[in-house]
Amino acid sequence: MNNKQEIKEKIQRLEKFNDPVMLMMIFLALPAVILATIFSSFGDGTLIKVAIASCFLFFTWLAFKVNSLIKQRIDALQSQLKSLE
């Protein structure tokens, strides 16, 4: 019974972070501030715009990767919980 309760608590904790929009906001807010500050001093050339876009693409990919890992972990915990029942 204690093991079931632990698994349920882990699932509830992970469910809070299972929102892709929230993860995108978290992963893109910090790079946006940093990139805007650093690259604004270099000018507004095409190379700077490409660098900014590639950084945002990387952090977007990272947010989706973290979201998929959270979903996989939730699925694994749910199947573990079903096997205990």
Image: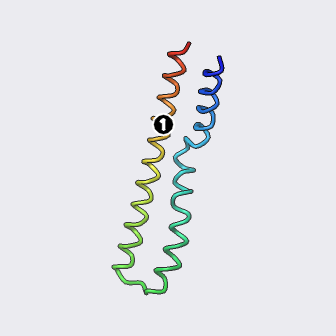
Quarter of the image where one finds residue 10: top right
The image shows residue 27, relative to residue 41, as above or below, that is above
Residue occupying the point 62% across, 40% down: 16
Instruction: Give neighbour class at mark 1: few <14, some 14-19, many 20+ (Cα, 10 Å).
Output: some
* Quadrant showing the C terminus: top right
Residue 49 locus on image (x, y percent): 39, 75
Q: Residue at x 50, y 40 (%)?
A: 70
Picture quarter with the N terminus? top right
Question: In the rendering, at what x and y percent does residue 35 appear?
Answer: 49, 74
Along the viewing direction, whichever of 79 and 43 lies nearer the viewer: 79
Point 49% across, 80% down: residue = 38
Tell me if residue 11 comes above or below residue 67 in the rendering: above
- 85 relative position to 48: left or right: right
Give the residue at the far front of this rendering. 2
- Judge by depth and name the residue closer to the eye, 66 or 3: 3
Q: Amino acid at mark 1?
A: Lys
Residue that numbered label 1 is attached to:
71
Q: How many marks?
A: 1
| Coloring scheme used | rainbow
35 up-or-down from 26: above or below:
below
The secondary element bearing badge 1 is classed as helix
Whole-percent x, y for residue 41 in the image: 48, 86
Q: Of residues 61 and 10, which is closer to you in this image?
A: 10
**Which residue is found at the position 61% from the left and 22% from the top?**
3
